[in-house]
Image: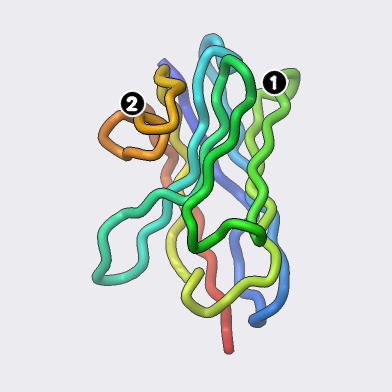
Amino acid sequence: QVQLVESGGGLVQAGGSLRLSCAASGRSFSSYTMGWFRQAPGKEREFVAAITWNDGSTYYADSVKGRFTISRDNAKNTVYLQMNSLKPEDTAVYYCAATSYSSSYSSTRANNYNYWGQGTQVTVSS
Protein backbone atom coordinates (compact mmCIF):
# COMPACT_ATOMS: atom_id res chain seq x y z
CA GLN A 1 0.00 0.00 0.00
CA VAL A 2 1.07 3.56 -0.74
CA GLN A 3 -0.50 6.64 0.80
CA LEU A 4 -0.15 9.91 -1.06
CA VAL A 5 -0.66 13.44 0.26
CA GLU A 6 -0.48 16.47 -2.01
CA SER A 7 0.32 20.02 -0.93
CA GLY A 8 1.27 23.35 -2.45
CA GLY A 9 -1.91 24.29 -4.24
CA GLY A 10 -3.43 27.75 -4.02
CA LEU A 11 -4.49 30.90 -5.83
CA VAL A 12 -2.06 32.54 -8.23
CA GLN A 13 -2.27 35.13 -10.97
CA ALA A 14 -1.77 34.22 -14.59
CA GLY A 15 1.93 34.06 -15.41
CA GLY A 16 2.81 33.05 -11.88
CA SER A 17 4.29 29.85 -10.49
CA LEU A 18 3.46 27.15 -7.98
CA ARG A 19 5.22 24.02 -6.85
CA LEU A 20 3.12 21.04 -5.87
CA SER A 21 4.50 18.32 -3.64
CA CYS A 22 3.29 14.80 -3.08
CA ALA A 23 4.59 12.94 -0.06
CA ALA A 24 4.34 9.17 -0.14
CA SER A 25 4.28 6.76 2.75
CA GLY A 26 4.29 3.02 2.66
CA ARG A 27 6.59 0.70 0.89
CA SER A 28 8.96 1.05 -2.03
CA PHE A 29 8.33 4.60 -3.27
CA SER A 30 11.32 4.24 -5.59
CA SER A 31 9.59 1.29 -7.31
CA TYR A 32 6.65 3.37 -8.50
CA THR A 33 6.17 5.61 -11.47
CA MET A 34 4.62 8.80 -10.16
CA GLY A 35 2.12 10.86 -12.07
CA TRP A 36 0.20 14.09 -11.80
CA PHE A 37 -3.33 14.38 -13.14
CA ARG A 38 -5.84 17.20 -12.95
CA GLN A 39 -9.59 17.61 -13.13
CA ALA A 40 -11.40 20.85 -13.84
CA PRO A 41 -15.09 21.32 -13.01
CA GLY A 42 -17.28 19.54 -15.52
CA LYS A 43 -14.32 17.90 -17.24
CA GLU A 44 -12.73 14.48 -17.15
CA ARG A 45 -9.53 13.82 -15.27
CA GLU A 46 -6.55 14.37 -17.55
CA PHE A 47 -2.90 13.44 -17.54
CA VAL A 48 -0.40 16.18 -16.74
CA ALA A 49 3.03 14.61 -16.17
CA ALA A 50 4.76 11.43 -15.07
CA ILE A 51 8.23 10.30 -14.00
CA THR A 52 9.18 6.64 -14.15
CA TRP A 53 10.66 4.57 -11.38
CA ASN A 54 13.29 2.74 -13.45
CA ASP A 55 15.16 5.37 -15.42
CA GLY A 56 13.53 8.65 -14.44
CA SER A 57 12.00 9.23 -17.86
CA THR A 58 9.50 12.06 -17.89
CA TYR A 59 6.33 12.51 -19.90
CA TYR A 60 4.16 15.58 -20.27
CA ALA A 61 0.82 16.52 -21.71
CA ASP A 62 1.22 18.80 -24.71
CA SER A 63 -0.68 21.53 -22.89
CA VAL A 64 2.00 21.82 -20.19
CA LYS A 65 5.21 21.05 -22.05
CA GLY A 66 7.81 23.74 -21.53
CA ARG A 67 5.93 25.17 -18.55
CA PHE A 68 5.70 22.31 -16.03
CA THR A 69 8.50 20.13 -14.68
CA ILE A 70 8.08 16.90 -12.75
CA SER A 71 10.82 15.61 -10.48
CA ARG A 72 11.24 13.16 -7.64
CA ASP A 73 13.41 12.76 -4.56
CA ASN A 74 13.45 9.09 -3.61
CA ALA A 75 15.30 9.83 -0.37
CA LYS A 76 12.38 12.01 0.72
CA ASN A 77 9.65 9.85 -0.83
CA THR A 78 8.38 12.94 -2.59
CA VAL A 79 7.43 13.90 -6.13
CA TYR A 80 7.16 17.51 -7.25
CA LEU A 81 5.42 19.43 -9.99
CA GLN A 82 6.92 22.82 -10.72
CA MET A 83 4.37 24.89 -12.61
CA ASN A 84 5.49 28.07 -14.34
CA SER A 85 3.74 30.52 -16.66
CA LEU A 86 0.41 29.42 -15.29
CA LYS A 87 -2.72 30.08 -17.29
CA PRO A 88 -6.37 30.29 -16.21
CA GLU A 89 -7.00 27.02 -18.06
CA ASP A 90 -4.61 25.30 -15.64
CA THR A 91 -7.21 25.78 -12.91
CA ALA A 92 -8.15 22.35 -11.57
CA VAL A 93 -7.79 19.93 -8.70
CA TYR A 94 -4.39 18.30 -9.10
CA TYR A 95 -3.92 14.68 -8.07
CA CYS A 96 -0.78 12.69 -7.42
CA ALA A 97 -0.83 9.00 -8.30
CA ALA A 98 1.42 5.94 -8.32
CA THR A 99 1.73 2.99 -10.66
CA SER A 100 4.11 0.11 -11.18
CA TYR A 101 4.08 0.64 -14.96
CA SER A 102 6.90 2.54 -16.66
CA SER A 103 6.14 2.72 -20.37
CA SER A 104 5.15 6.01 -21.92
CA TYR A 105 1.79 4.55 -22.95
CA SER A 106 0.92 3.17 -19.52
CA SER A 107 2.29 6.08 -17.53
CA THR A 108 -0.06 8.57 -19.15
CA ARG A 109 -3.29 6.67 -18.50
CA ALA A 110 -5.18 7.15 -15.24
CA ASN A 111 -6.62 3.63 -15.35
CA ASN A 112 -3.13 2.21 -14.85
CA TYR A 113 -2.57 4.01 -11.56
CA ASN A 114 -3.31 2.08 -8.39
CA TYR A 115 -2.89 4.73 -5.71
CA TRP A 116 -4.21 8.30 -5.57
CA GLY A 117 -3.95 11.28 -3.30
CA GLN A 118 -6.87 13.41 -2.19
CA GLY A 119 -6.01 16.29 -4.52
CA THR A 120 -5.00 19.91 -4.11
CA GLN A 121 -6.78 22.88 -5.67
CA VAL A 122 -4.93 25.16 -8.07
CA THR A 123 -6.69 28.33 -9.15
CA VAL A 124 -5.19 30.70 -11.70
CA SER A 125 -6.82 34.10 -12.00
CA SER A 126 -6.71 36.16 -15.17
Asked if residue 112 lies left or right of residue 12, the reply is left
Quadrant, the C terminus: bottom right
Q: Does 120 appear above or below 84?
A: above
Quick one: 126 or 52, which is closer to the camera? 52
- Rounded to the nearest angstrom, the CA distance separating label 2 from label 1 is 19 Å
Q: Disc 2 designates what residue? A: 114
x, y (%) of residue 84? 70, 64
Q: Amino acid at mark 1?
A: Asn
- Please name the residue shown 65% across and 75% down the image: 12
Quadrant, the N terminus: top left
- Please name the residue shown 59% across and 39% down the image: 22
User: How are the residues colored?
Assistant: rainbow
Q: Disc 1 designates what residue? A: 74
- Please name the residue shown 59% across and 57% down the image: 65
Asked if residue 9 lies left or right of residue 116, the reply is right
Numbered label attached to residue 5: none
Neighbourhood count class around disc 1 (C-alpha, 10 Å): few under 14, some 14–19, many 20 upward: some
- Please name the residue shown 50% across and 25% down the image: 33
Quick one: 54 or 13, which is closer to the camera? 54
Residue located farthest toward the bottom when viewing the structure as drawn:
126
Asked if residue 86 lies left or right of residue 60, the reply is right
x, y (%) of residue 43? 27, 66
Quick one: 11 or 70, which is closer to the camera? 70
Q: Earlier in the sequence, mark 2 or mark 1?
A: 1
x, y (%) of residue 53? 56, 19
Secondary structure at badge 2 equals loop
Quadrant in the rendering for residue 44: bottom left
Secondary structure at badge 1 equals loop
Q: Does 60 appear above or below 4?
A: below
Kindly indicate whether the residue at mark 1 contacts the one at mark 2 (C-beta within 8 angstroms): no
Q: Amino acid at mark 2?
A: Asn
Asked if residue 124 lies left or right of residue 61, the reply is right
